[in-house]
Amino acid sequence: MRRVVARHEALRTTFEAVDGVPVQRIADFVDIPLPVTDLGGLPAGERAERAGELAQSWCEQPFELTAGPLLRTAVFRLEEQDHLLCLALHHIVCDGQSITVLFEELAELYAQECGARPRPPCRS
């Protein structure tokens, strides 16, 4: 997530009103917490449903445009190797086209982190 947020200014953006006029502020760095909720203690048949309930409640929390971040992440652990990643983004920083780009980048970076694909060389 840090690599994606570092690449996209919109994910580091907040908005405030200055003399009644909206102003965009782009931070150099935004730390996006990634809390993990372990649902492994629940019966196997209840884990996905509980994850959905928690994700729904979590997604309904309002965003603070002036404080940010306007992206929230969470992971729900269902089993040892089965996790659910949830993203909530304010519509002011993400639309239908950019969410596709975000998902593609996340999938590629995840594959790199897992060793399934080599990381590209660093550019100076």
Image (cartoon, helix red, strand yellow):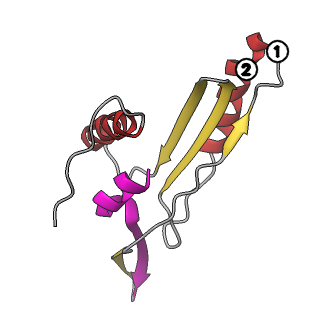
Please state which amino acid type lies under the numbered disc 1. Answer: Pro
Q: Which residues are magenta?
A: 1-18
Give me the C-alpha separation between circle 1 and circle 2: 7 Å
For label 2, count other residues whose C-alpha is less than 10 Å away and answer few (under 14), some (14-19) or many (20+): some
Q: Is residue 74 left or right of residue 97?
A: right
Quadrant position of the C terminus in the picture: bottom left
Residue drawn at x 58%, y 56% is 33
Of the pair 17 and 82, the residue shown nearer to us: 82
**Near-viewer residue (65 or 68):** 68
Q: What element does badge 1 sit on?
A: loop
Residue sitting at x 43%, y 77%: 16
Residue 20 position within the rendered picture, expressed as x and y whole percent measured from the top left: 39, 83
Residue 16 on the magenta segment: yes
Residue holding disc 2: 47
Left or right, 87 with reference to 37: left
Provide the residue designation for mark 1. 43
Q: Is disc 1 in contact with disc 2, using a CB cutoff of under 8 Å? A: yes
- Report the front residue among 69 and 35: 35
Q: Is residue 103 magenta?
A: no
Q: Residue furthest top?
A: 45
Q: 29 above or below 47?
A: below
Question: Is 31 displayed left or right of 106 in the figure?
Answer: right
The disc labelled 2 sits on which kind of residue?
Answer: Arg
Residue 62 position within the rendered picture, expressed as x and y whole percent measured from the top left: 59, 55
Q: Quadrant of residue 52?
A: top right
Secondary structure of the residue carrying numbered label 2: helix
Q: Residue 105 versus residue 19: which sits nearer the camera?
A: 105
Q: Residues within 10 Å of mark 1 (few under 14, many from 20)?
A: few
Residue plotted at (38% across, 57% down): 5
Is 108 drawn above or below residue 4 in the view shown?
Answer: above
